[in-house]
């Protein structure tokens, strides 16, 4: 029997983009399966009950990503 899937958006940090259908790509802190919250970038339906593929990062990984982005000429 499969384990029950659970998540909780602990903090909504910000919206990165929004699609015509109302889905948003967001940066949040999310607790997966009752574990400590991590930073999470993924797409969410307007009611936050459905989600798309995403990436979950520790604080250290987020700092490394920030350093990489800061070093880019965008």
Image: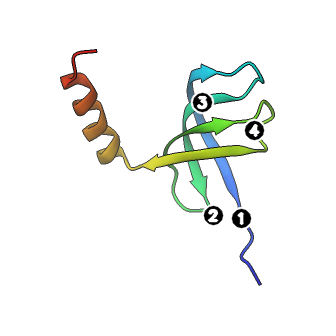
User: Which residue is drawn at the image coordinates 38% and 50% (left, top)?
Assistant: 58
Residue 21 image point, x, y percent:
78, 24
31 up-or-down from 27: above or below: below
User: Which residue is drawn at the image coordinates 60% and 30% (left, top)?
Assistant: 25
Residue 73 image point, x, y percent:
22, 16
Q: How did the renderer colour the structure? A: rainbow
The crowding category of the residue bearing disc 3, from other C-alpha atoms within 10 Å (few below 14, some 14 to 19, many at least 20), is many
User: Which residue is drawn at the image coordinates 35% and 45% (left, top)?
Assistant: 59
User: Which residue is drawn at the image coordinates 52% and 51% (left, top)?
Assistant: 37
Distance of label 1 from label 3 (alpha carbons): 21 Å
The crowding category of the residue bearing disc 4, from other C-alpha atoms within 10 Å (few below 14, some 14 to 19, many at least 20), is few
Q: Which residue matches tag 4?
A: 48
Q: Give the side of residue 53 with respect to residue 21, left or right.
A: left
Query: Which of pointers 2 and 3 indicates the residue nearer the eye?
Result: 3
Which label sits on residue 5?
1
The crowding category of the residue bearing disc 1, from other C-alpha atoms within 10 Å (few below 14, some 14 to 19, many at least 20), is few
Between residues 26 and 31, which one lies in front from this camera angle? Answer: 26
Q: Which residue matches tag 3?
A: 25
Query: Which of pointers 1 and 2 indicates the residue nearer the eye?
Result: 1
Q: Which residue matches tag 2?
A: 33
């Amino acid at each position: 029997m499969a384990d029950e899937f659970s998540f909780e958006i602990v903090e909504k940090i910000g919206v990165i983009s929004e699609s015509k259908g109302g889905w948003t790509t967001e940066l949040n802190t999310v607790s997966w399966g009752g574990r400590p919250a991590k930073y999470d970038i993924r797409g969410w339906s307007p009611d936050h009950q459905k989600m798309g593929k995403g990436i979950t990062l520790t604080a250290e990984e987020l700092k490394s990503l920030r350093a990489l982005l800061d070093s880019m000429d965008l």
